[in-house]
Image (tube, helix red, strand yellow):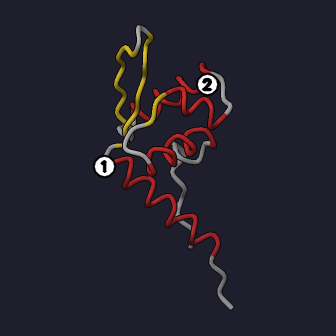
Amino acid sequence: MYKDLDPLLHSQLRLAIVSLLMTSDEVDFNLIKETTNATSGNISVQIKKLQEAGYIEVVKSFKNNYQNTSLTITKKGIKAFEEYVESLKQYLKTDN
C-alpha cells in the first residue's frame, strides 16, 4: 500500500529548497533563487510555509549593507524529507 506523500514537500519549489538544505549546512536566499529560477515572491511564500511547519529556520541579517536571508533545516525537516523519500521509493518498487 502506498503511503501519503507529505503535501508540504510535494511542491516542486519547497522540495527543491529542502533538498538544497539537505546537502548544505546553510543556504541563502540568492542561492535558492539562482538554483530554482523562481521569483523572489514565490520563494518567500514557500519559505514561510516551510518555516511555519517547523521544517526550516530562517535568519535575517545584513551582509555588506544588504539584507541577507539564510536558511537551515531542522531535525523535523530532516525527518520529514527522509520519510518523503522513503514513501517515494515505495511508489517505485515493483513486485514480480
**Type of amino acid under label 1:** Lys
Pick the residue in front: 75 or 26.
Answer: 26
Q: Secondary structure at mark 1?
A: helix
Q: Which residue is mark 2?
A: 42
Residue 2: x and y in percent read: 57, 68
Neighbourhood count class around disc 1 (C-alpha, 10 Å): few under 14, some 14–19, many 20 upward: few
Outermost bottom residue: 96
Quadrant in the picture for residue 13: top right
Q: Tell me what residue is drawn at x 57 percent, y 64 percent.
A: 88
Q: Position of residue 79 (x, y in %)?
A: 37, 55
Taking the spot 56% from the left edge, 33% from the top edge, the residue there is 32
Read off the residue under disc 1: 75
Name the spot of residue 37 as percent of width and height, x first: 68, 31
Query: Pointer 2 and pointer 1: residues touching (CB < 8 Å)?
Result: no
* Quadrant holding the C terminus: bottom right
Label 2: few (<14), some (14–19) or many (≥20) C-alpha neighbours in 10 Å: few
Q: Of 1 and 37, which appears nearest the observer?
A: 37
Which circle marks residue 19 in the picture? none
Disc 2 marks a residue whose amino acid type is Asn
Q: Whole-Å distance between the Cαs marked 2 and 1? A: 24 Å
- 37 relative position to 79: left or right: right
Q: Secondary structure at mark 2?
A: helix
The image quadrant where one finds the N terminus is bottom right
| Residue drawn where x is 45% and y is 11% of the image | 66
Sequence-first disc among 2 and 1: 2
In the visual, does 95 lie left or right of 59? right
